[in-house]
Amino acid sequence: MSENLVQVEHLQQYFPAGGYGKKKKYIQAVDDVSFTIQKGETLGLVGESGCGKTTTGRTLLRLYEPTGGRFVFDGDVIFDVEKKTYAHMLPYRKRMQIVFQDPYASLDPRMTVGDIVGEAIDVHKMASNKQERYELIIEMLRRVGLNSEHANRYPHEFSGGQRQRVGIARALAVKPEFIVCDEPISALDVSIQAQVINMFEDLQAEMGLTYLFIAHDLSAVKHISNRIGVMYLGRMVELADSYELITRPLHPYTKSLISAIPIADPKVAKASKRIVLEGDVPSPLNPPSGCRFRTRCPYADERCAQEVPEWKEVEKNHFAACHHIDRVS
């Protein structure tokens, strides 16, 4: 059995955007993304809004049906579009879960917290009686820092941080192995963000969880992730060990993201140079030819416009897709 719990190969997700016949248009939300996640590991996925991070996570869980690519989970093929192989998802819903970005929109306002957490327990028949069901619900609420009194309340009675904890308890209720964390801290106050990240780390140690941690804040991702992947306009541009990526970025886009991380020391902050990207992100409806980053890249030349850069292992376990890595680094 492979150590990789998650294996994604050439994932594609295109959404129809009008037109018909040969003129039919598609939004290329995710295009040719590949990565693996080992058991017990956290892979961070970063990039600016609209780069395809959330779509990647949702497509893996088949909340969106994939346009192309292959996804293998713990040795089982969840989907292989080329071979038209699609697994029946109900048994895997128990093993793969998601924590949504918005704790206000992802909880049913007409259900109590106890019923929200207990719904998955009912679907997968994990409790043989009402008492066992109640005990499982309370156990999950306690794991995320809530108590038995909260079980009878409704979502509107909670703060944003508490609601996100309810969402996490719901994901944990079926005792999954893999959780897609879809920007779980972006809607929270800064003071609460650190608490939630620490809680994710504690839960991972206790329950042996594997995370795909999606965020646009590199400073938060570097604390929780073993490895970090950087996406731009639907494609992966760099993937490396967390410390390696922050200290030795190879792609110009990664360098720009890292330069935007706030530094607490004023002397170091003054000495560090901010790399500001010019222009706007192109539309995924009509992405640039060749390298998708070329319209904003200071190193771009004619080759970048004609050839798609090869995704390759530049150094051991450090992957990047750029024609000018020797000039950038």
Image (cartoon, helix red, strand yellow):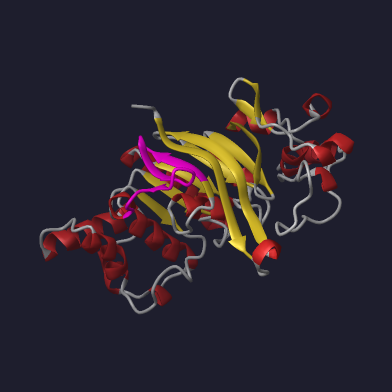
Q: Residue furthest front?
A: 21
In the rendered view, would you say 250 is above or below 277?
A: above
Looking at the rendered image, the quarter that the C terminus falls into is: top right
Residue at screen point 67% across, 33% down: 246
Q: Is residue 83 above or below residue 66?
A: above
From the viewer's perspective, is 72 left or right of 228? left
Can you say which quadrant of the picture contains the N terminus?
top left
Residue 221, x across and y down, in percent: 57, 43
Q: Position of residue 52 (x, y in %)?
A: 61, 53
Residue that protrudes farthest toward the bottom in the picture: 110
Q: Is residue 102 magenta?
A: no
The residue shown at (59%, 42%) is 33
Q: Is residue 75 magenta?
A: yes
Q: Is residue 203 visible?
A: yes
Closest to the observer, 101 or 72: 72
Residue situated furthest top in the rendering: 316
The image quarter in which residue 17 lies:
bottom right
Residue 19 at x, y = what percent?
68, 69
- In the image, 92 versus 212, the foreground residue is 92
Q: Is residue 130 above or below residue 66?
A: below
Q: Quadrant of residue 252?
A: top right
Please determine whether, in this image, residue 195 is positioned above or below residue 313.
below
Q: Identify the magenta region.
A: 69-89
Question: What residue is drawn where x is 49% and y is 34%?
Answer: 36
Q: Evaluate whether residue 145 shows in this view.
A: no
